[in-house]
């Protein structure tokens, strides 16, 4: 199987988690930002992640990919619904996380941004979605302070070190985006959670690219 991703994309991190968790062999391919032709040829629109199954059929949508890969061994573990508390927290705080992460993503060392044209295409896409990226960078401390307070609301979950379940496929990709923020003041519970999931699912944090 082949998985097509952007390295920075939270939805792609979600799809990568299940391959690592279930130790499913696959080929990881990075699509360049600005390349609309490749994903459109595969699934009819510009989207990632995309799974190419063994028979050559393409599948988009991150959670569809998660559930498909999870059931391949006949023993699925990603069941039920996301914890309501965590689901609400993500809905309330994802925009703040992205206000910190997106400006840094546009500047960071990701394979999908390895040409000037690709980086420019991505930057312009995010300006349309988030507005003035320089202003977001300048306001970083406000977003950091807000998130440090908000993380206290889910501290018990972060500390629990549960076996990886469906809730983590919603929470971890959001929190992982914070690792692109250099010197983010990680509470102990968050640091431990990130390492727990990253290690369990064999997915990278962005700490080596932090800005």
Image: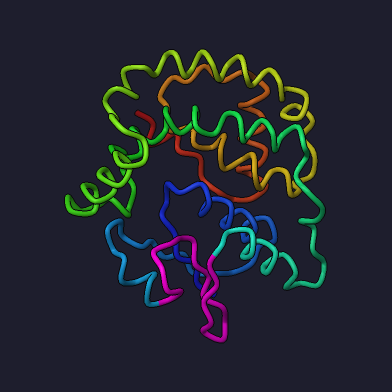
Q: Nearer the viewer, residue 182 or 35?
A: 35
* Residues shaded magenta: 42-60
- Is 122 one of the magenta-colored residues? no
- Is 45 one of the magenta-colored residues? yes
Placement of the N terminus among the 4 image quadrants: bottom right
Q: Work out which residue is located at the far bottom of the displayed protein and give it.
A: 55
Q: Work out which residue is located at the far left of the displayed protein and give it.
A: 116
Residue at 34% in and 47% down = 110
Residue at 31% in and 60% down = 32
- Direction from residue 198 to residue 4 in the image, left or right: left
Residue at 81% in and 72% down = 74
* Residue 44 place in picture, x, y as percent: 42, 74
* Residue 15 place in picture, x, y as percent: 58, 57
Picture quarter containing residue 198? top right
* Residue 27 place in picture, x, y as percent: 49, 69
* Residue 100 place in picture, x, y as percent: 42, 27
Q: Nearer the viewer, residue 89 or 183?
A: 89
Q: Is residue 43 above or below residue 169?
A: below
Q: Is residue 78 above or below residue 142?
A: below
Placement of the C terminus among the 4 image quadrants: top left
- Direction from residue 77 to residue 209 in the image, left or right: left
């Amino acid at each position: 199987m082949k998985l097509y991703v952007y390295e920075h994309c939270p939805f792609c991190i979600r799809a990568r988690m299940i391959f690592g968790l279930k130790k499913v062999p696959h080929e990881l391919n990075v699509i360049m930002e600005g390349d609309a032709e490749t994903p459109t040829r595969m699934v009819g629109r510009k989207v990632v992640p995309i799974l190419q199954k063994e028979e050559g059929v393409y599948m988009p949508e991150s959670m569809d990919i998660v559930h498909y890969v999870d059931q391949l061994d006949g023993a699925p573990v990603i069941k039920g619904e996301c914890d309501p508390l965590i689901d609400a927290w993500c809905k309330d705080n994802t925009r703040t996380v992205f206000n910190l992460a997106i400006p840094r993503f546009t500047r960071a060392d990701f394979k999908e941004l390895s040409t000037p044209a690709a980086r420019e295409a991505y930057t312009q896409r995010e300006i349309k979605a988030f507005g003035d990226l320089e202003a977001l960078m300048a306001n970083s401390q406000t977003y950091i302070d807000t998130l440090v307070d908000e993380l206290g609301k889910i501290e018990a979950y972060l500390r629990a070190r549960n076996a990886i379940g469906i809730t983590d496929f919603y929470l971890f990709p959001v929190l992982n985006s914070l690792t692109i923020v250099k010197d983010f003041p990680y509470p102990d519970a968050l640091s431990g959670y990130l390492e727990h999931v990253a290690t369990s699912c064999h997915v990278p944090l962005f700490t080596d690219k932090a800005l």
